[in-house]
Amino acid sequence: MPLKVEAHSGYSNLIGSGPGLAGSLGASETLPLLIPEDEPERHYLKPLSREELEVVAGGPGWKKFRSRLVLLFWLAWLTVLGIAITTVVLTPRPVSGHLHWWQKAVFYRIQPALFLDAEGTGSGAISRVSERLPYLKSLGVGVMILEGLFRPDVSILNLTQIDQRLGTLPEFHQFITDSNKAGLKVILDLCSVNNNKTELSSNASDYYQESLRYWLEQGVSGFEICSADTAFTEKTLKWSREPVNEFGTDDNKRIIMVKEISDYVPGSNASNSAINSSLVELVSRSLIPPSLNPLSAPEVAEVIESHLKTLHGEWPSWRVDGPLAWKQWKVVMVLMMTLPGTPAIRYGEEINEVPNPHNPKNSTTLFRSLSRIRSHEEALLYGTFTSLTLNTSLIFGSTNSTATPPLAFLRSWGCVHFLVLVNLGSESCALNCTWTMSLPESGLFVTSTGLNRFGPVTLQSIKLQPYEAIVIKLFETNPNF
């Protein structure tokens, strides 16, 4: 018999729209099979307040720590700076003595008579010298010594009478003015005037002093007196001192020079005069004294070495009176410009040009190169002088060698050292490693007689050519040097 099932009245609504699970699922067939959970609520970042920042940064104590850390940094930096300054201040360093203008300048001896015209009338002689002022300034010349300005018969008591063949007195006044404007000082050489000793009485001193005052008022920077007779020179200097002291300031002081005159005696010092140094600012000495015949290479080396041995804090003015071949003169010029003292060359000794191998169109002169180096390097002005002894057997390799030994010396200023090597002989020579052990190993070529050495160099590789002089700036690597 059939089973009768009586359903609930809502049974028929399982698939319908009535309430119930079936009804809710059947209500829409578009619902996703997986029902996602509800998304969490999004939280947006907000700026922290001051209180929150202090909490995150560690609170008020962290601010104090940072302030103290910055303070500690600056204290440490100031301490290091103070130590550095103290080290610089307390470190021994050379003290440069005050050099006067006559110690820093290069002197140029010139005779206006050399500019006389072919007829000997002297028309424009002073003007021709004036035209050369820009050229002399470009060479590095700072002082001109005018020689032969006065007539030989002019008395020492009347020095206002110049040689009229050279020009008129107003022309010479203009020449002094033009020279001072160009930055060139003028010194008058009084060696050519008539030094009659009978005129040097006490009554004549006033006339002589007035003559000096006349030229000092025109702008002359000093006078040169010859030391032919010590007693006569001493008296003349005492008379000259008073008017010279009346003119000029410390920066533009007027000076008195004494030109030493003596004959060369081999094996002896060429200087034999005794002048009161308190009366003289500068003494002119001949590095190569006059002689009847040109000196040989050993004789030149001998007289130069005798001068090197007598340098004890003096400041002479070097000149050359003796005849020299051009190959010897180039070497002597290097010596004059690197020795302690004031170099003084004569007209014409600077004109020999040396071709520049790197730029043949731009030739230069050895004198211009040396004067430029001397004006820029303190060691060649203020530096101490140290003569170095070279062993001939170690250089030439033979104890029987008759070759002229080279000369060497140092000019030192603090940690800067200039080594000057001079070979006056006709043979090449190389430096021995034993000799160079006490010197820095390397350096830089500054100049040479041939202007053909450039760049860095090691001392053991140097080979001096005949009649060659070189200047090397050493690099100090040994602290005990």
Image: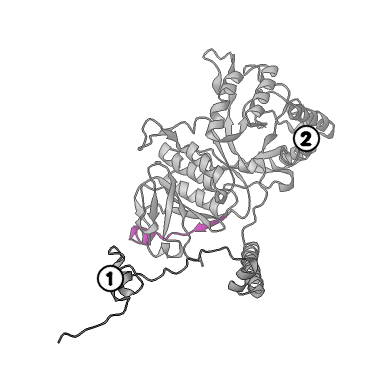
Disc 1 is placed on an element classified as loop
Q: Which residues are magenta?
A: 384-402
Pick whichever, 346 or 461, lies toward us: 461
Q: From the viewer's perspective, tell me whether residue 21 is left or right of residue 122.
A: left
Residue farthest to the left?
1
- Percent of width and height locating residue 299: 46, 47
Q: Is residue 264 above or below residue 50?
A: above
Mark 1–mark 2 distance (CA, rounded to whole Å): 136 Å
- Percent of width and height locating residue 58: 61, 75
Q: Is residue 307 above or below residue 320?
A: below
Residue type at numbered disc 2: Phe
Disc 2 is placed on an element classified as loop
Q: Does the magenta segment cover residue 190?
A: no
Q: Quadrant of residue 112?
A: top right
Q: Which residue is mark 1?
A: 15
Q: Is residue 110 above or below residue 381?
A: above
Name the mark on residue 247: 2
Q: Residue at x 38, y 30 (%)?
A: 361
Residue farthest to the bottom?
1
